[in-house]
Image (cartoon, rainbow, N blue to C red):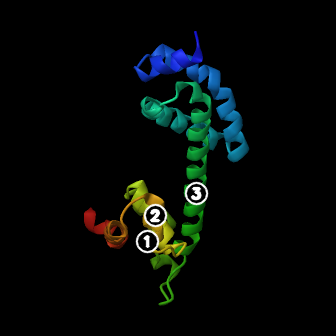
Amino acid sequence: MDATQDVRLAQDGDTDAWERLIQAHMPRIFRLLRSQLSSPEDIDDVAQDVCLHAIIGIRGLRKPELFGQWFRTVAFNRAMQWQRRRYAEDAIRPRLWQPDSQGIEDDQAVSRIDIVAALGLLPPSDRDAIVLHYVYDWSSTAIAKLQGKPAGTVRWRIHQAREVLRTALVSDPKSKE
């Protein structure tokens, strides 16, 4: 069967056609991901993410004959987003781990695990905004352009995310017992 026909069938929900497309194109996708990511676990995670985004987005593909290029673009974009998130997390952890300048003892400082857990409470776009704002010192306008949202919305989301983090990090776990 023609690949273009498989794309049209997959757009209509045919799972067999989708499987044929995946089998035909995944070797190139894995080569692309291996060139961008270092760990086999990351490659597998991003490959799954690529398939999920492709399944969700295939109906929006207007030119079925360009499926291969479109699928590789999805893979490239997901890998780049994975890398940006990984670098942002690696950059924020050392800064958040250090006690503040008021002389807080190490045993009183918020633990790294608590910080990672608190960041995990946030939706990905809010987590990205917090990292970009506080770690990379981006303005809300720059973050808004990146996220495609109004600057006022980004400022509000940063404010709300900061409150979620404050609540999560300041609450006393012993008082919950």
Residue 156 or 8: which is nearer the viewer?
8
- The residue identified by callout 2 is 145
Visible residue check, residue 154: yes
Q: CA distance from mark 3 to mark 1?
A: 19 Å
Classify 10 Å Cα crowding around label 1: few (below 14), some (14-19), many (20 and above).
some
Residue 43 or 157: which is nearer the viewer?
157
Classify 10 Å Cα crowding around label 3: few (below 14), some (14-19), many (20 and above).
few
Q: Are marks 3 and 1 in contact (CB under 8 Å)?
A: no
Classify 10 Å Cα crowding around label 2: few (below 14), some (14-19), many (20 and above).
few
Name the residue located 56 percent from the left edge and 39 percent from the top edge: 74
Q: Are marks 2 and 1 in contact (CB under 8 Å)?
A: yes
In this view, the residue farthest toward the front is: 63
Q: Position of residue 166 (x, y in %)?
A: 35, 72
Q: Which element is circle 3 on?
A: helix
Q: CA distance from mark 2 to mark 3?
A: 16 Å
- The residue identified by callout 3 is 84
- The residue identified by callout 1 is 141
Name the residue located 56 percent from the left edge and 63 percent from the top edge: 88
Q: Position of residue 60 (x, y in %)?
A: 43, 33
Q: Earlier in the sequence, mark 3 or mark 1?
A: 3
Q: Is residue 96 above or below residue 87?
A: below
Q: Position of residue 29 (x, y in %)?
A: 65, 33
Q: Which element is circle 1 on?
A: helix
Q: Amino acid at mark 1?
A: Thr
